[in-house]
Image (cartoon, rainbow, N blue to C red):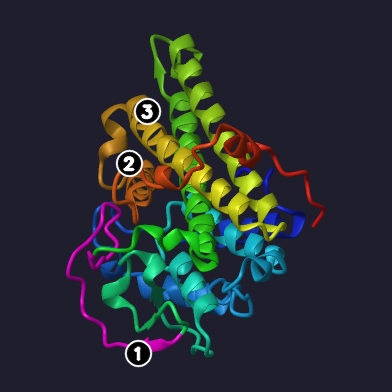
Amino acid sequence: MSTTILTDEAAQLAATVADVVATWQLPAAGRLVPDAEHFHDQWKVAEELGWTTILDDVDCTSFEGLAQAVELITAAAAVTRALAHAGAALPVRQTLVARALASQPIATGSIVVSAHSFGVWDPIASAFVGADGTTQSRAAQGPVDRDVAARPVHRADHPEDLGDQPDGVLGQFLLVEEIAGAAHGAIEQARAYVSSRVQFGRPLIKLPAVAQELGRLTIAQLQLDEAIAEFARRLHTGSPDRIRFAALAARALACDVASDVAAHTHQLHGALGLTADATLRHHTLLLWADRDEGLHHRSWGVQRLPTCEVDLWSLSQPEPAHPL
């Protein structure tokens, strides 16, 4: 996976996650994830390796708190991204954010959600963390519904401004990292397929139209990586308006890239990418599910942009690189 936007330590953590997940058996795409034979064993591995508790000591109630915890947030992003890159759907991202928001310690091993989960994994969570940090234990409700990625979901209306607060920004940051990881994984799947699939005496990738399409998707992936890198640089600043703008820009681009990559990697695969056991399908279902997560409509966030051109230009100015 691309590690160009990760620090050395985060890249090493991502590589470790990739090594572990490479041995995992993923459920058939479309099958309810927690019903898969190995789901609970894989969740236990994630918990034992500390992937779910990275943000436990992070103060996500203020932007200053986020600025002081960028290294931990980058580590959490590395785990989230690496899992998505492998096509693994586990409630790690949602648990990381909920545990960071909790004002009291939560026992490890629990699947924990908050409003920033937008109902995803809610039916099988053992605890819910409210906006004030209080934790409520809950009995498993059983899977009542599923999203596109076959994750259990409780559908409910959520406030449109949920992403404006520091904890919401943290949730958005990990979400776009997950989208980027899934997109990169899908592109790698497509590249491997067109490199090995031979028609008319040569690999498909030798066809100019195929190579051009693969290159276009790769550029889209790199653009998303840069938007996320700008988002990460602004987390150092503690400047709410500039951080919120970066979050908005990264989410908008991530949604476009998710749609683009999912549609065209399937096109490059032909019908073979649509089978239930196709690895590509794990990535594209996650892309479609994450793209729509928590969005009320396609114009999400537009009303919060400044109407003055000068103010908009100021928010668009890139942040200088920050040494970690």
Among numbered discs 1 and 3, the one appearing first in the sequence: 1
What kind of residue is marked 2? Answer: Arg
Residue in front for this viewpoint, 101 or 32: 101
Q: Is mark 1 on a helix, strand or loop?
A: strand
Among numbered discs 2 and 3, the one appearing first in the sequence: 3
- Quarter of the picture containing the C terminus is bottom right
The residue positioned farthest toward the front in the image shown: 308
- Quarter of the picture containing the N terminus is top right
Residue denoted by label 2: 298
Relative image position of residue 278 (x, y in whole percent): 33, 43
Residue 56 horizontal side relative to residue 286, left or right: right
Q: Residue 137: which numbered mark, if any? A: 1
Q: What stretch is highlighted in magenta?
A: 134-156
| Residue 149 among those drawn in magenta | yes
Residue in front for this viewpoint, 72 or 143: 72
Disc 2/disc 3 C-alpha distance (Å): 21 Å
The residue positioned farthest toward the left in the image shown: 144
Please tell me how crowded label 1 is: few (under 14), some (14-19), or many (20+) other residues with Cα within 10 Å: few
- Residue drawn where x is 48% and y is 38% of the image: 253
- Residue drawn where x is 29% and y is 45% of the image: 297
What kind of residue is marked 1? Answer: Ser
Q: Residue 264: which numbered mark, if any? A: 3
Q: What element carries label 3?
A: helix
